[in-house]
Image (spheres, rainbow, N blue to C red):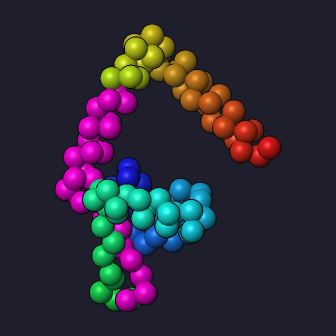
Amino acid sequence: MSLIAQNPGSSQKELADKAGITGPGLVSLVDELERQGLVRRDRSTTDRRRNMLVLTEKGEQTLSEMFKVVSQIEAPIRDELSPKELEQLIGLIDRVLKALGEN
């Protein structure tokens, strides 16, 4: 949802590329978000084969609430670590995720 919010009106293919997932993988996610009323597919006015994705009002509210919760959960970590340590932690987590994804 965050990716859609940051790129309103993007096509499903564009968002799949940005997310690093396959088109069919994104379609199933979008189907579920649409079923929940969080995302809307709008037909492009210039290319009727293309769907542009946008958050609904409910989707925007849900995303805002999610960010508040994440911020509360992360606060003790941000308070404990210096900016440099936080950067190192994120770098290490990225490396771990990359290693897990390659196996």
Q: What is the chief secondary structure element of the magenta stretch?
A: helix
Residue shown at the point (38%, 50%) measured from the top left: 2
Residue shown at the point (51%, 71%) measured from the top left: 13
Farthest-out residue, right: 103
Image quarter (top left, top right, bottom left or bottom right) of the C terminus: top right
Residue 52 versus residue 92 in the image, above or below = below
Residue 63 colored in magenta in the image: yes
Decide if residue 8 is in sight here. Answer: no
Q: Quadrant of residue 30?
A: bottom left
Farthest-out residue, top: 80
Q: Which residues are magenta?
A: 48-71
Q: Taking 37 as reference, is 14 left or right?
A: right
Residue 75 colored in magenta in the image: no
Residue shown at the point (22%, 53%) measured from the top left: 58
Residue shown at the point (53%, 56%) measured from the top left: 19
Between 16 and 28, the one lying in front of the other is 28
Q: Taking 67 as reference, is 56 left or right?
A: left
Farthest-out residue, left: 57
Q: Taking 39 as reference, is 77 left or right?
A: right
Decide if residue 31 is in sight here. Answer: yes
Residue 85 versus residue 40 in the image, above or below = above
Q: Quadrant of residue 77?
A: top left
Give x and y (percent) for residue 9: 33, 69
Give x and y (percent) for residue 29: 47, 59
Between 43 and 78, the one lying in front of the other is 43
Give x and y (percent) for residue 53: 35, 68
